[in-house]
Amino acid sequence: MVAIVAQIKRWKKQLGGSGFRLLFLAALVGVVAGAGALAFYFATNAVDQQMLHNIGHYHPPVEGVAVKTIAPYIDTLQMDTSWYLYVLPMLGGLFSGWLVYTYAPEAEGHGTDGALEAFHQRGGLIRARVPIVKSIASIATIGTGGSAGREGPIAQIGAGFGSFVATRLGLSVADRRILLLAGMAGGVGATFRSPLGGALFAVEVLYRDPEFEHEGLIPCIISSIIAYSLFGSVTGWEPLLATPHFHFEQPSELLIFLVLGVVCALLGVGYVKVFYGMRNLFKRLALPDWLKPAVGGLLLGLLAMAVPQVLGSGYGWVQSALYGNVALWVMLVIAFAKILATSLTISSGGSGGVFAPSLVIGAMLGGAFGATAQMLLPTLTQDPQAYVLVGMAGFFAGVANAPIATLIMVSELTGNYGLLAPLMLVCVVAMIAMRHNSIYEKQVPARIDSPAHFGDFVIDVLEGITVSELATKGRSPTLIPAEMTLPNVLNKISAAKNAYFPVVNPSQKMVGIFSLNDIRRILNEEIPPGLVVAGDIATSQVIYATPQDHLTDVMRKITARNLEEIPVVDPLHPDQVLYMLSRRAVLAHYAEQVEKTKSAYLQ
């Protein structure tokens, strides 16, 4: 025990106090993400069993079972179901739409985008109610046959808890973002029984370019391991999908896999266009937002009358295809119908993820491609069923711009690592071929484009420059008396150009500060405006600068708290505001210095 304690102290010294705390909190987030994944898993299965199986008499193939010898060959789209089945998606959409648009509108759609937006644009902040609303709405959507997956909801559930922990403990914005990613990693790693893939997904999916949020990798790995271990100890350790023993032994076959990567990219472009085109159509629909998921569910039910295979996650059909039990034309129909079904479910405002549908689309495309390749090039095609697995990974890698995470996740969720070489090739080709398309709208091109790293790339140029050199670029502060009521505050700031407003006492000394966002939040509360005064809105913890501060330090303060403006105060009297300095003014000065540096270098 003494040795263990001594080792922990050494780790703590090596990591630093804050780093050790962050790893501990990542482990805590992993526990909750794993527990959340379990609750979501059992609740979704229970609703699915009651609605689709018992009421709708919908019995697709079961995933995780080696179906080669126990399942019939599927060469028809017809299924013996109850007519109730085709009404269920509309009912699920109606409940989901009402719940989401009543309590948390940001929970609509696929939750991964919500987590990405929180990371890039909101300083890692997710409202505490969002994971709860997202969970219930997604259970209703998926359990009633919606063409959606569990990745988006569980990513937002885990991310929401990570954000909640960081906010409650008063951690920095940077730490909150890392715990948000740790929550995503834990949820995804547990749900898909893919601990490494879940960790890599959380740090890779943020950007369209091949970049990682490397600061969050270790916390994500810790969270994912713990969440996966908790989930597996309850549900079992078998991979999500059973596969034959695939292996790669024919290098010349890489030429065919190369073509598959291009085909995945082409269909991926169509998928993204249909997905967001459908969203734009629903936005223009003259109906209340909460009713639109029900309309999407109604149209999905009509589609399911012709192609019932589009309902639910679709993993059972992938399982059958992996053993060659699905006809070529059936796989093609399911692939294209699943694109439309997913767009009707999620683009209408329904709640669910795009990972599972994308895997199904890619698997069906890969299976059809492999069967065609075997007919046309039998000597080069070693195993047409292998293309099902590779197509799964390639298609999602292309639409998500996450090739590394995807090939690892697909290998882990199938328990099959024999196709790593073709997986790597197809994933990279598909990603490169559709670089400017993404199913995740809130991805940013690269780290330099993310507000989360806005200040990371300006530090060197600003070294040695003090705030006093930008005094002429500062704005006069709009001082708000602490006792001024909200209606008068709104009148006073309506013509102001500032983003932040110092609050002063009768002696004109600053006692707090608030932003326009703080005003918006208070307006959403059901409090009579006349009872709210400026002092109630303001925070007393003011982040400020002095004329002697270096711009490097100011930029770190602005970036850490995601501020648009900072008050510059008298160093001898910190409660006296001299002027307001904006992020834009600092960046404009940075641009000037860059040009000067370039000119000096060219001379």
Image: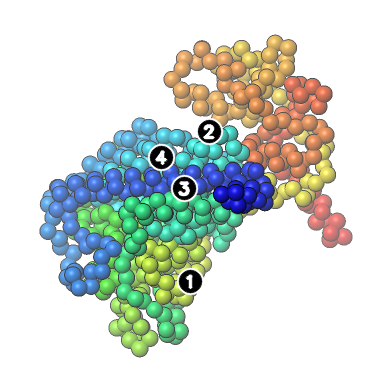
Q: Circle 1 sits on which residue?
A: 424
Q: How many badges with numbers are in the image?
A: 4
Sequence-wise first label, 1 or 3:
3
Residue 500 x, y percent position in the rendering = 64, 28
Comparing 31 with 462, the one in front is 31
Q: CA distance from mark 2 to mark 3?
A: 17 Å
Alpha carbons under labels 1 and 4: distance apart = 34 Å
Which secondary structure, mark 3? helix
The residue beneath circle 4 is 131
**Marks 2 and 1, Cα distance to the nearest angstrom?**
41 Å
Question: Which dot, 2 or 4, sits closer to the camera?
Answer: 2
Tag 1 or tag 2, which sits nearer the N-term?
Answer: 2
Mark closer to the observer (2, 1): 2
Which amino acid type is shown beneath numbered disc 2?
Answer: Arg
Callout 1 secondary element: helix
- Rendered image coloring scheme: rainbow
Residue occupied by mark 2: 168
Left or right, residue 13 beside residue 425: right
Q: Amino acid at mark 1?
A: Met
For the residues carrying marks 1 and 3, which lies nearer the camera in this image?
A: 3
Q: Which residue is mark 3?
A: 30
Real-space Cα separation, disc 1 to disc 3, in angstroms: 29 Å
Q: CA distance from mark 4 to mark 3?
A: 15 Å
Left or right, 316 with respect to 433, comes to left
Q: CA distance from mark 2 to mark 4?
A: 16 Å
The residue that appears at 51% across and 38% down in the rendered structure is 165
Q: Which mark is first along the chain, 3 or 2?
A: 3
Identified at 57% across, 57% down, the residue is 212
